[in-house]
Amino acid sequence: MRSQPFTSAVVAVALVAPLTVATQASASTTPSGGAAVPSQGGARYGETPRVHGLASLPRLTLFRLSSPTLTATASYRFAAPRSVRKVRVQLLAAKGSRVVKTFALGSRRPGRIETLRVTAKGLAPGTYRVRILAASLRTAGVTSVVRVKVAAPAPPRPPASAPTPTPAPSTDHVFPVRGPFSFGGSGGRFGAPRTGHTHQGQDLTAAEGVPLVSPHAGRVKAARYQAGGAGYYVVIDSAGEDRDYVFMHLRAGSTVVTEGQLVKAGQRIGQVGNTGASEGAHLHFEIWTGRGWYSGGRPVDPLPYLRAWARR
């Protein structure tokens, strides 16, 4: 008796049904106990019947994916006495039998793990099934179909906008500190490292109580207090130019302007202090361009401006 060869893998494990071996009654006298043991033909007593040629068919002993989402690596291994022909890996739709993509791999050597990189290129987002096929392949102990997912592509990032160019320092402004001061060392410069951020201004060391004035005419945008940071601070929206000027760590009780007030260049706004997160009396001074201080603008290095104003 010969079996019909299998042509592809199936989802579930293929089982080989045992054969019933027919025997012919002996023409001699029937023994007194049970049936006669056949002396030839079929299987020997106590053995499992074999189907001619079935043991030589290739078996799929391993089939897996390294990831449930693409891109992934499919690994497989065959057990066969010779090369396995017409090996194909197919991507099928999540439901039904529609084949979406086929990878034709030709002949593959048995006994070793083979790999195939399965990518999402050209595939719509969704769930797919993966199947492996080969000439005369039968499965043994594993399934031949697994599921993978193709994620929707991430939305494109907006193009990076060109940084706002730093305006050239002007000299028609008033230096904000009206007394002896120092620019200090590198730790007080713009961009110096801080815990969790970088320094966004320039520190000017001066004695507590030294007067501070507005560098330019404008409107007071904020006059507030922040205990764990800026202390007493003032923000001035400069008139006729795209800048905000920020003063931090002012002396307690020294602020003499209010929010919404118009000020002139050189008008007093407060005194150097040591309030908030400050270590020693100093002015932390910032310049913001664009839409302004924490309202869509960005900070720029104040030092070139301060040096230009100090030379007046």
Image (spheres, rainbow, N blue to C red):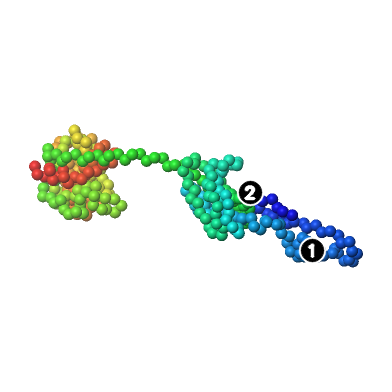
Q: Residue at x 13, y 50 (%)?
A: 181
Question: Which amino acid, by three-letter code, is at mark 1?
Answer: Gln
Q: Residue at x 49, y 41 (%)?
A: 123
> Which sits in the foreground, 85 or 259?
85
Residue 169 vertical position relative to residue 27 in the rendered view, above or below: above
CA gap, disc 1 and disc 2: 33 Å
Residue 78 vertical position relative to residue 125 in the rendered view, above or below: below
Q: Is residue 235 left or right of residue 32?
A: left
Q: What number is the disc on residue 40?
A: 1
> Could you tell me which quadrant the N terminus lies in?
bottom right
Question: Which amino acid, by three-letter code, is at mark 2?
Answer: Thr
- Disc number lying in front (1 or 2): 1
Q: Position of residue 144 (x, y in %)?
A: 59, 51
Q: Does the image show residue 288?
A: yes
Q: Residue at x 52, y 55 (%)?
A: 114
Q: Position of residue 180 (x, y in %)?
A: 10, 50
> Which sits in the foreground, 166 or 45?
45
> Could you tell me which quadrant the C terminus lies in?
top left
Q: What number is the disc on residue 7?
A: 2
Q: Is residue 147 left or right of residue 183?
A: right
Residues marked 1 and 2 touching at CB (< 8 Å) = no
Q: Mark 2 falls on what kind of element?
A: loop
Give the mark nearest the N terminus, 1 or 2.
Answer: 2
> Which sits in the foreground, 164 or 204?
164
> Which sits in the foreground, 128 or 252?
128
